[in-house]
Amino acid sequence: MDNEMKIIESEGVDDFEDDNEIIIISDTENERIDVYVSSQQGDISRNSVQKLIADGSIRVNDKKVKANYKVKLSDCIRIVLPEPEALDIAAEDIPIEIVYEDDDLAVINKPQGMVVHPAPGHYSGTLVNGLMYHLKNLSSINGILRPGIVHRLDMNTSGLMLVAKNDKSHNFLAKCLKEHSINRIYFALVEGNIKDDSGVIDAPLGRSEKDRKKRTVTYKNSKNAVTNYWVEKRYGKYTLIKLKLETGRTHQIRVHMKYIGHPVVGDDVYGSKTNRFLLNGQLLHSKSIGFVHPSTGEYMEFESELPDYFQKVLKIIGGQQI
């Protein structure tokens, strides 16, 4: 085994990052385990790590340790995260565009700026709060914080999403996602003129060591990620592209486009810090989604228009509505 730290997370649908178990193979020696784990998992504080150790939820080589245990090279550190505490997630009368709905599922057109599901410190105003009001029945597989959520979109990514209304449908759609049989097409406006008419970006993604909230292309602690793209139209300094994911990693399109030198316009995390078009987020839209219905076996496909702010930018740079 190489002396590189590896993080292995339980395989989840669409790369959910908060699965219950994390395994770290240490790449260092003589560092306190509470310090080491909190440095590797940027979203878990040192205080929280100490509580997990005290509860026996962090073990080294299958043995309980104390917070002052000194990590050894290639130690197997197993972290079992607690289930989310029971919270009162309220239904809210939030406007939601329901493109399609039946007894098993719904197709939602999510607006830019809407968070998909509640998270610590952010329990209202999310898509889930609105779904609970408008749909009533939602699958329970992802727990109290993510009822019905089969896959996610970033807060500032707009477009079509699938929502499961019962557990049977959720399991079926999750399996389809894992097998890559759900066709999800995105449109993005990116910076620069992409020379090739099409391409495949095959580059693994993991957490950035400089900023644990960001993702980056890396071969350390990473998961495979593949993005296909096709040029729709060139606008000199900008290119409108169509994309299809073979994997569903967090921030995948945004990181991959930055990686090849063409960040998504409006992306203030992975793109340019200038905001020429006064945007509130990246010009990235989930334009179409196609899937086999879990009950009927029928193939269904839905499309959505690019949002007005996206169309406005295309007009500014000389494009036409599409």
Image (tube, rainbow, N blue to C red):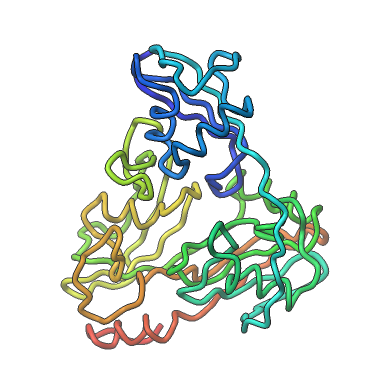
Residue drawn at x 54%, y 34% as measured from the top left: 9
Identify the residue shown where x is 60% and y is 65%: 123
Depth check: 159 or 33 in front? 33
Task: Indicate the position of residue 274 as horizontal and vertical percent values.
Answer: 19, 71
Quadrant housing residue 148 = bottom right
Which residue lies at the image location 47% right of the left edge and 25% below the top edge?
24
The correct choice, above or below, for 278 with respect to 230 in the image is below
Q: Is residue 215 above or below residue 49?
A: below
Taking the image as shown, residue 183 lies to the left or right of residue 242, namely right
Front-lying residue, 279 or 201? 279
On the image, the x and y values in percent for residue 74 come to 42, 13
Is 165 on the left-hand or right-hand side of 45? right
- Image quarter of residue 146: bottom right
Residue pushed farthest left?
A: 236
Q: Quadrant of the N terminus?
A: top left
Q: Nearer the viewer, residue 288 or 32?
A: 32
* Image quadrant in which the C terminus is located: bottom left
Where does the image place residue 258, in percent across and percent down from the top left? 27, 54
Picture coordinates of residue 301, whole percent (x, y): 63, 68
Residue 321 vs 127, above or below: the answer is: below
Q: How many marks?
A: 0
Query: Which of the 4 quarters of the picture holds residue 232?
Result: bottom left
147 and 266: which is toward the camera:
147
Q: In the image, 221: left or right of 117?
A: left
Q: Residue at x 24, y 51 (%)?
A: 260
